[in-house]
């Protein structure tokens, strides 16, 4: 837990040793359970890492990197080891919190979550179509991806991800619902794609493979815009930036993602596609699309409903919740965006009931 607290703050071991007044070798032994920490060291660590001293008494199992962000499969030179450690530490902390919150409530998914292995079905587009059919989704755009995932029992959370470039990650541990954490710094269209990308991992990938990221991207595009559904929307004339801009608020996808959809629908020749990408570069919208086309980010509701249930139905204060979650009381409201709950704004719990 000492190592977890340190990594979550993005502090390297040598730096932490200086803060705690011990040698790096002693801190290494303590973190690897080869030496007992003193109470004074734990008190200093609690202050340095902004956690209660009781955090170090927790006995929850600690999990490593999930396959979708494992360095073996996700080779991102711009994500440092320290950044990855911080994200994994945050995921473990969130699972610990979720385990405690769910001990007082039942989560009742309205949709079942099937396993459609890529080895069996072979094609991400086919799997996306099967899942949409399984959930009896109507044809056309998906109005709210977050709501559909939460109805399937998936917990969605927003996070700055330690300011890393990781778009999102899925954390699945035994006995717990799947947890998807998405980078809150993304625009709404990218966030929806990231959610569907992570959904693809949950549905298709029981085991890692070198192609899993590409397959999850293909799944996301086809889940958001099935080929047969979106093809008529590109019309009979040439696909250009104006048409892509018009389609973005309808399908709630980035203009870049719509280029891939148009290509998949057979609406672009190779030269037309290359020309579009040139236009993207000239207009400087390849990575930053026109802000006037932005739309609001989808907001998850299950986590906030769990907190609302504890505060309003069970009578917990924020300080008491921080205590049972072994988290600093001054950090908890911002970590889970509890402003609306504390201020008393309406936020009806969905799919939850108190365990009696």
Image (spheres, rainbow, N blue to C red):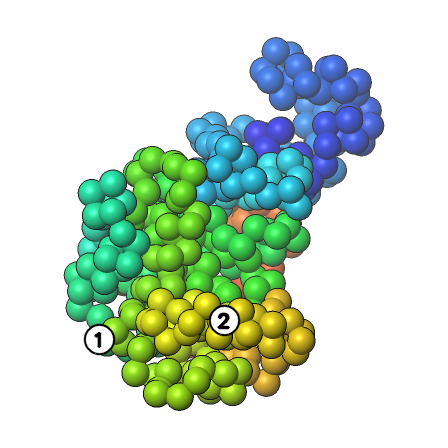
Residue 120 drawn at (x, y percent)? 20, 43
Residue 270 drawn at (x, y percent)? 46, 68
Residue 63 drawn at (x, y percent)? 46, 32
Q: Residue 271 carries which label?
A: 2
185 is higher (above) or lower (below) than 294: above
Residue 255 drawn at (x, y percent)? 50, 75
User: Which residue in the protein does label 1 denote?
Assistant: 138
20 is higher (above) or lower (below) than 267: above
Please give left or right for residue 292 compared with residue 264 in the image. right
**Secondary structure type for disc 2:** helix
Nearer-N-terminus badge (1/2): 1
Q: Which mark is residue 272?
A: none
Res. 88 in view: no
Please give left or right for residue 187 compared with residue 220 in the image. right
125 is higher (above) or lower (below) than 176: below
The one nearer the camera, 185 or 284, is 284
User: Which residue is at a point 65% across and 78% down the rendered structure image?
Assistant: 283
The one nearer the camera, 352 or 12, is 12
Res. 118 in view: yes
User: Which residue is at a point 35% across and 67% down the rendered structure image?
Assistant: 264
**Secondary structure type for disc 1:** loop
283 is higher (above) or lower (below) than 101: below
Please give left or right for residue 271 compared with residue 23 in the image. left
The one nearer the camera, 154 or 164, is 164
Among all residues in the image, which is located at the extreme top?
34
């Amino acid at each position: 837990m000492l190592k977890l607290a340190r990594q979550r703050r993005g502090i390297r071991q040598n730096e932490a040793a200086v803060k705690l007044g011990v040698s790096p070798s002693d801190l290494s032994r303590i973190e690897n359970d080869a030496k007992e920490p003193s109470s004074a060291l734990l008190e200093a660590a609690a202050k340095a890492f902004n956690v209660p001293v009781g955090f170090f008494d927790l006995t929850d199992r600690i999990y490593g990197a999930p396959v979708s962000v494992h360095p073996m499969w996700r080779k991102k030179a711009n994500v440092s080891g320290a950044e990855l450690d911080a994200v994994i530490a945050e995921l473990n902390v969130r699972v610990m919190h979720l385990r405690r919150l769910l001990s007082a409530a039942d989560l009742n998914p309205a949709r079942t979550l099937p396993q459609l292995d890529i080895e069996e079905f072979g094609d991400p587009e086919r799997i996306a179509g099967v899942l949409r059919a399984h959930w009896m989704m109507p044809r056309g755009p998906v109005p709210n991806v977050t709501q559909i995932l939460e109805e399937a029992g998936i917990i969605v959370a927003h996070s700055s991800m330690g300011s890393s470039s990781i778009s999102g990650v899925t954390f699945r541990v035994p006995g717990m619902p799947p947890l998807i954490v998405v980078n809150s710094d993304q625009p709404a269209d990218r966030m929806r794609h990231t959610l569907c990308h992570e959904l693809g991992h949950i549905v298709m990938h029981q085991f890692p493979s070198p192609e899993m990221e590409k397959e999850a991207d293909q799944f996301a595009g086809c889940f958001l815009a099935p080929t047969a559904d979106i093809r008529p929307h590109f019309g009979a004339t040439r696909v250009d930036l104006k048409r892509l801009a018009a389609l973005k608020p309808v399908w709630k996808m980035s203009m870049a993602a719509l280029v891939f959809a148009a290509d998949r629908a057979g609406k672009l020749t190779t030269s037309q596609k290359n020309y579009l990408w040139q236009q993207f570069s000239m207009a400087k919208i390849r990575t930053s699309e026109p802000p006037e086309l932005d739309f609001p980010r989808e907001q998850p509701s299950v986590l906030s409903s769990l907190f609302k249930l504890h505060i309003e139905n069970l009578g917990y204060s924020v300080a008491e919740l921080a205590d049972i979650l072994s988290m600093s009381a001054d950090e908890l409201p911002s970590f889970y965006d509890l402003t609306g709950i504390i201020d008393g704004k309406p936020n009806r719990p969905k799919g939850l009931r108190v365990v009696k």
